[in-house]
Image (spheres, grey):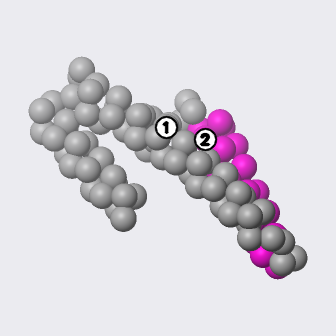
């Protein structure tokens, strides 16, 4: 995803926040926190991952499907890559 170079720092910051959220879930489980606490933390991490996925999908569409300088074959390949990623994500 070379086109992400210009957005690399904010994306990495987002990934690091998600890692922190997952670590907090692990700590809560280790410390035997209440179910609702753990569920809320997992829901927050899931929301953060969904947000990251949304951002990456948008970047992919803009660069590999909708970019005006791409040949039709490149657009089709970009679309197929996106479809495969969404199918895996939706499982």
Q: Position of residue 88 (x, y in %)?
A: 35, 62
Location of residue 11 by image quarter: top right
Contact flag, marks 1 and 2 (Cβ < 8 Å)? yes
**Residue carrying label 1:** 55
Would residue 26 be counted in the magenta stretch?
Answer: yes
- Seen at 21% across and 49% down, the residue is 80
Q: CA distance from mark 1 to mark 2?
A: 9 Å
Location of residue 32 by image quarter: bottom right
Apparent side of residue 4 relative to residue 79 in the rendered image (left or right): right
What segment carries the magenta color?
A: 8-30
**Residue carrying label 2:** 11
Whichever of labels 1 and 2 marks the residue nearer the N terminus, that label is: 2
The quarter in which the C terminus is drawn is bottom left
* Mark 2 residue element: helix
Q: Position of residue 58 (x, y in %)?
A: 41, 34
Q: Position of residue 66 (x, y in %)?
A: 26, 27
Apparent side of residue 87 relative to residue 38 in the rendered image (left or right): left
From the viewer's side, name the closer residue of 9 and 79: 79
* Mark 1 residue element: helix
- Seen at 39% across and 58% down, the residue is 89
């Amino acid at each position: 995803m070379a086109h992400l170079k210009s957005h690399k720092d904010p994306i990495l910051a987002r990934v690091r926040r998600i890692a922190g959220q997952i670590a907090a879930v692990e700590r809560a489980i280790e410390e035997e926190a209440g179910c609702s606490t753990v569920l809320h933390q997992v829901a927050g991490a899931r929301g953060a991952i969904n947000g990251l996925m949304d951002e990456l999908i948008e970047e992919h569409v803009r660069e590999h499907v909708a970019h005006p300088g791409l040949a039709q074959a490149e657009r089709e390949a970009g679309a197929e890559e996106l479809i495969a990623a969404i199918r895996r994500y939706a499982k």
